Amino acid sequence: MTRTGRSPRRRLAGAERRSELLDAAEAAFMAAPYDQVSLLSIARAAGSSDALLVRYFETKANLYLTVWERRLEELFSQQASVDADVGPGMSAQERLLRGLHAYFDFVKTRPRAWAQQFLAPDGEPAGAAELRRTWRHRYAELIRERGGLPQDAMVDTALAGFIGLNEALCFEWVLHDCPDDQRETIVSMSAAALAALMAEARKTSIPPAPGSRQE
């Protein structure tokens, strides 16, 4: 019996089908709060079935977390490209500044997806907040390595403060549709805050050598 009124489903390789399902899920979760999105609506948007979604991701919560994981891996992939392009003699300050530019590049490519964590977190599955805490820690470790900062409680505090400030700056930028004429100013503000926090953290965490003069 021939089906009518419905688009035929395309036969795709597993990885390609999974990617399409994730694209449809991301679009759905960006358009409506988590608890208003159904697996069936995502499947229909992808020209698939909810049974296939369950086969790949088991639950809506797992699907949502996978969408976030993919997005964050894209961010760190861009950051890795920055470090792969480091030239001889490049200063820590230059590496950190390039990393910030890459971060803002990432935000601009998917501003609503990035801002969603601040716009409508209510109703998210429990693992979403933990996932974001994990990636913030990972980003802090990346900054620590680029800046040559020690493992220290005060440095940890400074990095956590910087990440919160940088997210706030990005969020305000997104709210104004990421205007290009504001970008350099905002990145400079972020870089200046990071430099100040790093300087203070170094001063606090590294004691002066015995017999040295203190300013």
Image (cartoon, rainbow, N blue to C red):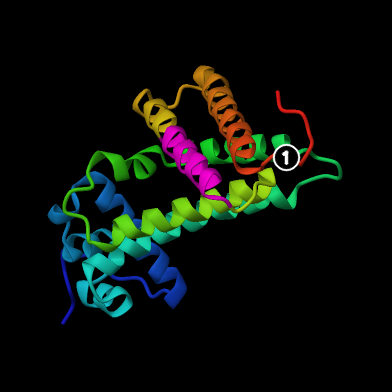
Magenta stretch: dominant SS?
helix
Q: Count the marks: how many?
A: 1
Whether 85 is drawn above or below 91: the answer is below
Q: Position of residue 85 (x, y in %)?
A: 75, 48
Residue 159 on the magenta span = yes
Horizontal side of residue 212 vs 118, given as left or right: right
In the image: residue 170, left or right of residue 79:
left
Q: Nearer the viewer, residue 110 or 187?
A: 187
Q: Position of residue 5 (x, y in %)?
A: 16, 63
Image-quadrant location for residue 52: bottom left
Q: Residue at x 38, y 32 (%)?
A: 171
The C terminus lies in which quarter of the figure? top right
Residue at the farthest left position: 36
- The N terminus appears in which quarter of the rendering? bottom left
Place residue 76 in its image quadrant: bottom right
Judged from this view, the residue extending furthest toward the bottom is 1
Residue drawn at 57 percent across, 53 percent down: 141
- Direction right: furthest residue: 88
State the residue in front, 83 or 55. 83
Relative image position of residue 34 (x, y in whole percent): 19, 54
Query: Label 1 crowding class (10 Å Cα cut-off): few <14, some 14-19, many 20+?
Result: some
Q: Which residues are magenta?
A: 152-167
Residue labelled with disc 1: 92
Residue 150, position as x, y percentages in the image: 64, 50
Instruction: Reply above or below: 9 against 42.
Output: below
Which element type, helix, strand or loop, lies under badge 1?
helix
Instruction: Check the image and report above or below for 50 versus 155.
Output: below
The residue depicted at 69 percent of the width and 47 percent of the height is 148
Vertical side of 35 occupied by 19: above or below: below
